[in-house]
Amino acid sequence: MVKIPNEIFRQIEKYMPFPSVDIVILKDQKIILTKRTIPPYRGYWNLPGSVILKNEKMVDTVKRSSKEELGIEVVNPTFIGNYETFTKFRHYITHLFATKHKSGKIKLDFQSSRVILVDPNRIPSHTVPIQRLMIKDALKNKIYDR
């Protein structure tokens, strides 16, 4: 996999959509949400996720992002669906996965200030709007049964 230098990333985001993954991670029958410290959606609760890097499979992005953003290992990433989001910063084409916490204690990186475990039927109102839909879709796919 190849990481893109920040200055090139900022130039590309002006012209191209970004393929990314967002992840519904179950831990103790609850979903992990983090409070964003960076745009877009600074101050909102959100699902972990990342841009897919060149030569990186989507399931590998799920595993990398879980490790980088939360310090945890996940198991059995399952594809749920595709979503498209436009923000003033960039255009995302997001692939949603559901997975379960396997091991590791949650430790946040620079992108988040807090973490909560929430009942998927009681998502906080100040959650990234498209991700509220993503969580509902993951529930419809019976993520608890995996």
Image (cartoon, helix red, strand yellow):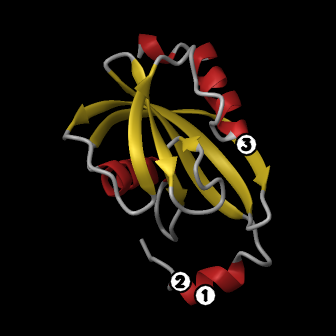
Q: Is residue 21 left or right of residue 14?
A: left
Asked whether the viewer can see residue 60, the reply is: no
Residue type, label 2? Asn
**Residue type (three-letter) at the residue carrying disc 1:** Ile
Q: Is residue 74 above or below residue 69?
A: above
Identified at 77% across, 50% down, the residue is 85
Q: Which residue is mark 2?
A: 6
Could you tell me which quadrant the N terminus lies in? bottom left
Amino acid at circle 3: Tyr
Between 96 and 7, the residue placed more toward the observer is 7
Mark 3 Cα-neighbour bin, 10 Å: few <14, some 14–19, many ≥20 = some
Dot 3 falls on a residue whose secondary structure is strand
Q: Assign a secondary structure to mark 1.
A: helix
**Residue 31: x percent and y percent?**
44, 26
Q: Nearer the viewer, mark 3 or mark 2?
A: 2
Residue 56 lies, with reference to residue 118, above or below; the image says: below
> Residue 83 bears which disc, if any?
3
> In percent of the image, x 58 and y 17: which residue is there?
139
| Of the pair 30 and 24, the residue shown nearer to us | 30
Q: Quadrant of residue 138?
A: top right
Q: For mark 1, what is the residue?
A: 8
Tag 1 and tag 3, C-beta contact below 8 Å:
no
Question: How far across and down, in percent of the image, does residue 72 sit?
Answer: 26, 44
